[in-house]
């Protein structure tokens, strides 16, 4: 066996993959709580591709883990859940090299990775390559202890007709995929304020834990913060009436949307950073 090798994490190796992932994310309780049974449940439910799990191994044991999710329709590959064993020198280098080779061999145009702020060592590894930091996202939460202001009264029929189950893309963090599968989100409200057509707010409630909710917010172009706040309050007011008390969402960092969310009580729990590498190929 070479000094360091990269293998697919399947069968018994899944426990090694989860061991690295848990050690790297132990500061964040939600991620650290995933068990082998949780992971196997995601695989059985087809929420993740079993071929995407990669593990970097040495003779001493596992040193790095990640998922490689390939989107051929966009010509893009995603490094998801890149996790490194603490205090292992050069951990993750062979793994990223392997992923780069796979990406080039398939002729893909872009390689992306979203790294959570409590996994700073993963960002350090990516910075050794030509990845460019492109975007920062804030992950926010609001524990509603009292009924929110009503905000706006808008007919939501048109929006609700187009509102389906909450869909989390496979390349998103594993903890989000697990929560999406475990909570069984159902749509409860969709709002678009007539004075702010560039923002749509969709509220979801967990069928399994009805006090849990999630806001999916679509925004394009220039938005007015006051109208955004009214739209958010309208959705939260409706969700509160349905029994939701704990709401999470995501917004681009230092954006009008983030400001609007924090101004009505949302708190930033953690941030994530999107890194991008554009692939270039010489003509033959």
Image (tube, rainbow, N blue to C red):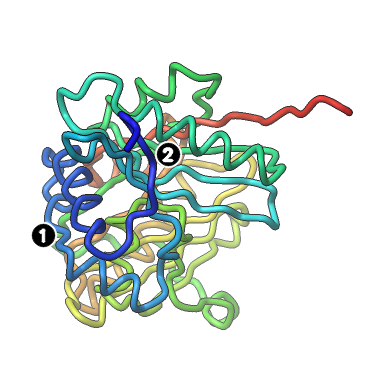
Q: For numbered disc 1, what is the local secondary structure? A: loop
Residue 261: in sight, yes or no?
no
Q: Are marks 2 and 1 in contact (CB under 8 Å)?
A: no
- Residue that lies at the very extreme toward the top in this rendered image: 128
Q: Position of residue 200 (x, y in %)?
A: 53, 60
Q: Which mark is residue 114?
A: 2
Residue 221 spot, x, y in % from top left: 64, 42
Quarter that holds the N terminus: top left
Q: Residue 127 in the image: state x and y as whole percent.
A: 43, 19
**Going by the image, does 35 lie left or right of 170?**
left
The residue that label 1 is drawn on is: 145
Count neighbours of disc 1 (C-alpha within 10 A) and say few if under 14, some if 14 to 19, many if 20 or more: few
Which is nearer the eye, 122 or 284? 284
Q: Nearer the viewer, mark 2 or mark 1?
A: 2
Residue under the point 65% across and 37% down: 104
Quarter of the image holding residue 82? top left
Residue at image coords 54%, 64%: 192
Is disc 2 surrounded by few (<14), some (14 to 19) or many (20+) residues within 10 Å? Answer: many
Question: In this view of the protein, which residue sits in the foreground, 154 or 232?
Answer: 232
User: What residue appears at the point 37 percent right and 36 percent down from the top-left corner?
Assistant: 115
Q: Secondary structure at mark 2?
A: strand
Q: Specify whether 244 is left or right of 180.
A: left
Q: Is residue 49 above or below residue 59?
A: below
Q: Can residue 82 be seen at all in this image of the molecule?
A: yes
Q: Is residue 57 left or right of residue 243?
A: right
- Where 94 sits versus 17, above or below? above
- The answer to which of marks 2 and 1 sits earlier in the sequence is 2
Give the farthest residue toward the front. Answer: 1
């Amino acid at each position: 066996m070479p000094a360091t090798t990269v293998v697919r994490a399947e069968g018994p190796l899944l426990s090694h993959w989860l061991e690295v992932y848990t050690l790297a994310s132990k500061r964040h309780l939600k991620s650290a709580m995933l068990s082998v049974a949780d992971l196997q449940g995601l695989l059985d439910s087809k929420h993740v591709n079993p071929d995407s799990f990669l593990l970097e191994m040495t003779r001493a044991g596992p040193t790095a883990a990640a998922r490689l999710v390939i989107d051929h329709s966009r010509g893009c590959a995603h490094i998801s859940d890149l996790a490194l064993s603490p205090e292992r020198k050069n951990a993750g280098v062979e793994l990223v090299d392997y992923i780069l080779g796979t990406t080039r061999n398939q002729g893909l145009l872009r390689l992306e990775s979203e790294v959570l702020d409590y996994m700073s060592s993963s960002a350090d590894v990516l910075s050794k390559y030509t990845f460019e930091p492109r975007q920062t996202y804030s992950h926010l939460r609001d524990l509603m202890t009292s009924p929110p202001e009503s905000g706006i009264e808008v007919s939501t029929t048109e929006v609700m007709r187009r509102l389906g189950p909450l869909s989390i893309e496979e390349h998103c963090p594993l903890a989000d995929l697990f929560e999406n599968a475990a909570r069984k989100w159902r749509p409860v409200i969709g709002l678009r304020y007539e004075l702010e057509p560039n923002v749509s707010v969709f509220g979801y409630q967990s069928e399994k834990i009805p006090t849990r909710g999630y806001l999916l917010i679509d925004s394009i172009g220039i938005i007015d913060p006051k109208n955004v706040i009214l739209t958010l309050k309208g959705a939260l007011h409706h969700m509160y009436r349905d029994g939701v008390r704990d709401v999470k969402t995501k917004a681009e960092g230092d954006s009008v949307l983030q400001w609007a969310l924090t101004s009505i009580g949302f708190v930033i729990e953690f941030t994530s950073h999107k890194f991008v590498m554009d692939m270039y190929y010489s003509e033959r």
